[in-house]
Image (cartoon, rainbow, N blue to C red):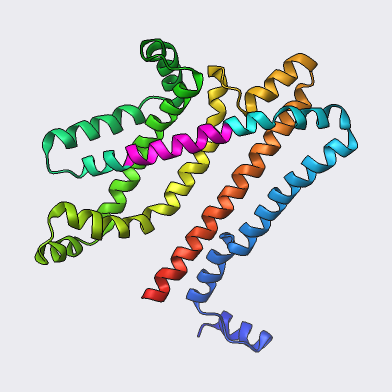
């Protein structure tokens, strides 16, 4: 023990802390825990709800008028989001299976699809499908929006499915083949059910991202939440109030679904620990 350390011990009467303990304390103090994250979520979520309730009470004109003007836009937003997620899941699963397929042509097609779509911005895809392919295939604004979002997010979900399938130990497939199953049967009965547990959290995150990106479909004459807010603002010139309400509604929706995703992840972690 050095002279300085000895002096410190005499003054405090306590032995020096171990370097590992000090390092662990410093690291944990820099990383917010689950309680801090949940507290921040509660502040944002309930704060947005309080504002949505308080603003129409404080100023019925124009906030009450805005809230009565946008509900059909909210319905269109959910319609586009749910339909796009369903189509993207199917497309993503097929492309993800294609990415790991042993057939060269299938693997090449799936890989090209993923790389091309992920390399083009979603806004460009929306314009291309609506203005270039829409007249060719007789697609209206709603169908063009669903097609563009499905194709775009299908590419990202394909990578999630591919990574999820490849995360399953190879011994699972080998054991299934040893029991007399074909590779297709083993994939659908053994591998994919385990993959679902792995990919559910990232798919939930993609759903939240798609919900926010659905605001872009307002440029295709789809009367979603953002477009309805913009229509109200353009006729009344209450831009601040209209976009404040739209932003708060989006915030409430995304925070609500992000909490659901978080609960799902916690449930999966707890379920996994119980099995181990």
Q: Position of residue 232 (x, y in %)?
A: 74, 20
Q: Position of residue 185 (x, y in %)?
A: 18, 55
Q: Give 9 or 104, whichever is nearer the viewer.
A: 104
The answer to which quarter of the image holds residue 91 is top left
**Residue 259 higher or lower than 152, as above or below:** below
* Image side of residue 121 versus residue 181, left or right: right
Q: How many marks?
A: 0
- Which residue is at the front of the view, 13 or 259? 259
Q: Is residue 272 above or below residue 132?
A: below
Magenta stretch, main secondary structure class = helix
Rendered residue at 12%/56% (across/down): 182
Which residue: 53% across, 18% down? 220
Image quarter of residue 92: top left
Q: Position of residue 74 (x, y in %)?
A: 63, 33
Task: Say which residue appears at 73% left-offset and 33% top-offset.
Answer: 245
Specify whether 270 is left or right of 242.
Answer: left
Res 198 quadrant in image: bottom left
Q: Is residue 81 magenta?
A: yes
Q: Is residue 2 magenta?
A: no
State the extent of the magenta-drawn residues as a range: 77-92
User: Which residue is found at the position 89% from the left and 33% from the top?
Assistant: 59
Say left or right for 141 vs 93: right
Looking at the image, residue 194 lies above or below residue 106: below
């Amino acid at each position: 023990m050095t002279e300085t350390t000895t002096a410190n011990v005499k003054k405090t009467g306590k032995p020096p802390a171990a370097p590992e303990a000090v390092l662990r304390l410093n690291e944990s103090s820099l990383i917010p825990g689950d309680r801090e994250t949940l507290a921040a979520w509660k502040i944002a979520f309930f704060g947005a709800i309080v504002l949505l309730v308080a603003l129409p009470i404080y100023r019925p004109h124009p906030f009450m008028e805005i809230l009565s003007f946008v509900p059909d836009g909210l319905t269109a937003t959910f319609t586009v989001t749910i339909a796009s997620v369903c189509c993207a899941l199917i497309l993503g699963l097929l492309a993800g299976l294609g990415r790991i397929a042993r057939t060269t042509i299938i693997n090449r097609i799936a890989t090209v699809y993923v790389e091309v779509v992920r390399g083009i911005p979603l806004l460009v895809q929306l314009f291309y499908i609506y203005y270039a392919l829409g007249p060719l295939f007789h697609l209206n604004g709603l169908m063009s929006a669903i097609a563009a979002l499905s194709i775009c997010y299908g590419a990202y979900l394909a990578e999630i499915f591919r990574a999820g399938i490849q995360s399953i130990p190879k011994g699972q497939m080998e054991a299934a083949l040893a029991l007399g199953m074909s590779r297709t049967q083993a994939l659908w009965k053994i591998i994919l059910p385990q993959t679902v547990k792995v990919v559910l959290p990232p798919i939930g995150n993609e759903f939240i991202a798609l919900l926010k990106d659905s605001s872009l479909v307002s440029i295709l004459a789809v009367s979603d939440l953002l477009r309805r807010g913009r229509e109200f603002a353009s006729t009344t010139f209450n831009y601040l109030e209209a976009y404040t309400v739209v932003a708060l509604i989006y915030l409430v929706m995304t925070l609500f679904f992000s909490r659901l995703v978080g609960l799902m992840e916690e449930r999966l972690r707890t379920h996994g620990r119980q099995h181990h």
